[in-house]
Amino acid sequence: MATSRRYGKIGYINGMRGIAILMVLAHHILQPLQSPVPASDTSALTYFLVQPFIYNGWLGVNIFFVLSGFVLYLPFAKQQAVNFEPFVFLKKRAQRLLPLYYVNVSVCLAMLFGEPIFWVAANAVIFLFALLPTPVVFFPPNNPPLWSLGIEIWFSVLFPILLILTRTRGVVLVLGLLTAAAFLFHALATAAFHEEGKYLNDVADTIPGRLGDFCIGMLAAHFWFRRNGRDSLRGPIGYVLTLATVACIYLALLLSTARYVGELPPEVQTLANLLLASGTAMMILLLQSVPDLHFIRAVLEIRLLQLIGMMCFSIYIWHWQILHAFNLLLGDQLWVRTPVIAVYLAVLSIVSICSYRFIEFRRQPARKIFLMS
């Protein structure tokens, strides 16, 4: 996506992607060193205003799911692709996502050098099906973050079916029912298969339980187009909707923290996910409609943040393996509190830039993909 004025009307989507990948990156770097604590073990200020914002970086994945639904559906909400060809769409998505995935898988398998051949073969089979997270193999070996990439790719596989259903049965009806069913599945699975001390649930956070985030993103695209060209939301209405959006996102973070430390039942995480997805979708629409949010748009359209968002696939797929390599080399993860963290970020940046340039967009001119045009 491109930024407003210079790069297009919804460049803030790339900025939101940039925020999401930075959240995930911070979570994986800091999470092993510290965790949230119950209200009884800390001050009210820390509990309500600090912990929700520093211990929920893993929820950046939820934001990615919503943005994926928005970005994939927006061209069809605009009726720019009336003659939809499912196989052409799937071919393009495969060409976009699978080359980098299989390069990364090759690295994962190379890390098993010296292991018995049957173990390497077993892992090769696991990676072949890692695109379909299941309770048996939820986190792929050697690169656990691939669980969410698998869900993203399967969203693309399911998208043609969703598009056909929305065209024949109605956008709001189909997506609304699927969203309700997905979050109901998530709540029931979370209650039935909850494990203490885990951010994710091996059953609830598979494709049926996360489809609701994607559908909410599609609904955001639907309403984004319907609002396009209409009068801006000025004055009290804009302020009220903005406060409601901020409240949704804040409550999602607070409830998620309280659930993790055991102060609320596990199925509260479903409500937190719903609030975060809804807040993300509402933020997309508000940035389109409320002129007073120009400062937030300007921040999200900072070129560096946009570029990070555009590179999020490469950053996401490599960051954990590089982090793990540093941990093995230095013996633990305490190094993230030292200047060595700058070395890690430099290595990650170089690898991600090369991956983005020579694997993801190998046929695109560098000036375009790095926003230098």
Image (spheres, grey):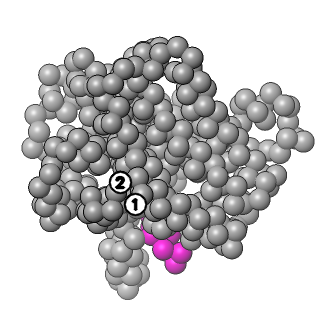
Identified at 70% across, 55% down, the residue is 268
Q: Position of residue 41 (x, y in %)?
A: 88, 41
Identified at 45% across, 28% down, the residue is 286
Q: Secondary structure at mark 1?
A: helix
Q: Position of residue 218 (x, y in %)?
A: 37, 49
Report the magenta stretch's main SS.
loop
| Residue 342 in sight | yes
Q: Position of residue 143 (x, y in %)?
A: 44, 60
Q: Quadrant of the C terminus?
A: top left
Q: Position of residue 313 (x, y in %)?
A: 33, 46
Q: Which mark is residue 171?
A: 2
Check contact, mark 1 vs mark 2: CB within 8 A.
Answer: yes
Q: Front-most of 205 and 226?
A: 226
Q: Which residues are magenta?
A: 133-142
Name above or below for residue 92 compared with residue 60.
below
Q: Quadrant of residue 74?
A: top left
Identified at 64% across, 69% down, the residue is 188
Q: Quadrant of residue 303?
A: top left
Tell me if 162 is positioned left or right of 213 in this view: left
Which residue, given by chain and number where applicable, does mark 1 sit on? 174
Tell me if 56 is positioned left or right of 21 in this view: right
Indicate the amino acid at tag 1: Val
Tell me if 9 is positioned left or right of 131 in this view: left
- Neighbourhood count class around disc 1 (C-alpha, 10 Å): few under 14, some 14–19, many 20 upward: some
Identified at 34% across, 57% down, the residue is 170
Name above or below for residue 62 compared with residue 134.
above
Indicate the amino acid at tag 2: Val
Q: Quadrant of the N terminus?
A: top left
- As measured in the structure, the alpha-carbon distance from the residue carrying label 1 to the one carrying label 2 is 6 Å
What is the tally of numbered marks visible in this picture?
A: 2
